[in-house]
Amino acid sequence: MVSAAAATAFHEFFDFPLHISANAFLITLWLGLAVRLATSGVGAKPAIRPRGRVANWSCVGVGAAALVLAFAAITQGDEAPFPYEVDRLQTPAQVRTFLLAHPGNPRAHLMLVKLMGDRMTLGRLSEEVKIALWLEPTNPLARDIYARILFERGQESRALKEITTSVFFSPDPASHFYLGGMVPRLSTQERAAIERGYEMAIERRFFQAVQGLGDFYHYLGEFTKEARTYEKGAATTGDPALRVSFLTSAGLAFAQAKEWSSATETLHKAAQLASGDPAPYQALIRVYAEARDMARAKAVVAQGREEGVDPFPLYFALAKVQLDSGDAAGAQASFLAAVKYRPADFLSLLYLGQLYSQQQEFDRAGMWFKRAVESNPRSVDALAGLAAAEQNSYHYYEAERAYRRALELAPQDAGVKRSYDELEQKVQEGEADHQTLQ
């Protein structure tokens, strides 16, 4: 154990293994055991001769040295430890110098490609990317760049295989520059290659594979395929929470495909498995509202409450769909029900203030806006709403205070500035009329 600690201390001169908490904890455990063994006897006649003071102090010295080096690694200031210092390199020359010292770092080769840009020839680009791939075969960026090189060389079949492999190794859409909003602009062959990669990853049950393929179909507008992907993911996962999430996503995708029966059936299945999770119920409320069946949307709230789901998100979801459908009275009633369960919820309070303002019940609107400001004192919308309500209730002093607070938070807000100037002008005109009458 002491020899292992000494080796780690020596390693610390050249790298930063003790920067990793698990390593630091392990070496501390080793040193503790070493000190314990060196300082305690085993009965009156120990089978092993106790070590002398030199051995004891050597354990303490090695431990202290290791702890000092660990502290130095953790408090090294702005210097980034290897290999992360490569992210701070800013010129190709700096990257080349780094590569001379660390030629086996794939990040450095890709950083050189990034910094060189169009100045790098296709041959040199290919060479650097191949090195990065040899060092780290699962790196999605390196493989995607290599696929682009193959496309430029006219080797389309090889390029498509590289795309499939890249997606298979890294199903996360964020790790590929051609996924997301660019998907509809890809060729049919490129889409097929991506699809194959995701299907392979799903078969191996790779993390984010189901979500990635679902997003892929979503961007293509193929909502039924998206729903079937999530259904398959729900059937194969062993995680109950993930199963509920997949079924909820499947139901929403069916709804976008206008397959209302499949959507509601899938979401009801998710709700049965939810164990208090409000997400499937909220999705059901939205789907029934989109299908113009508000009676069933309201019934979902009652069903969720009976099954022990937190009523607040259910009432809030119902209020939102009622508001979107133009049912202001229904939305107002649902928001009022929601704030009974969460009296300080900012959005509910803000919506109530706005709804009462629309009905020209300015005293009530002011009350809700005041509560919204108490919940979020830095909300310009709440302060502006409060100021307008107070102004319409002829409480000019309170209105002026609210406008000033709003302008302190958002001095560039033209709408608030205009309303404040109009109020000031009205107050001044009122004072002038009063003086004239006197």
Image: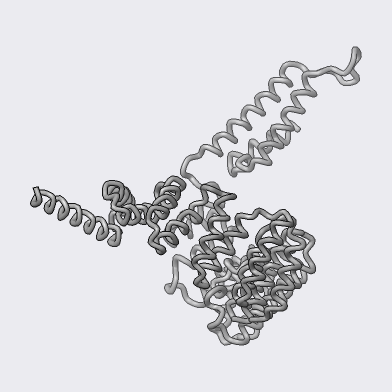
Q: Which quadrant holds residue 287? A: bottom right
Colour scheme of the picture: one colour
Vertical placement of residue 31 versus 40, above or below: below
Q: Is residue 331 visible?
A: yes
Q: Is residue 144 left or right of residue 417?
A: right
Location of residue 297 in the rendering, given as x and y in whole percent from the top left corner? 64, 68
Image point (63%, 32%), residue name: 66
Quadrant including the N terminus: top right
Vertical placement of residue 130 versus 66, above or below: below
Location of residue 148 in the rendering, given as x and y in whole percent from the top left corner? 55, 78
Vertical placement of residue 283 versus 226, above or below: above
Closer to the camera in the image, 219 or 91: 219
Image point (58%, 73%), residue name: 144
Closer to the camera in the image, 181 or 249: 249
Image point (29%, 49%), residue name: 395
Location of residue 289 in the rendering, given as x and y in whole percent from the top left corner? 60, 72
Location of residue 197 in the rendering, given as x and y in whole percent from the top left corner? 69, 75
Q: Is residue 373 left or right of residue 188?
A: left
Q: Is residue 278 left or right of residue 115?
A: right
Q: Is residue 134 visible?
A: no
Image point (28%, 52%), residue name: 394
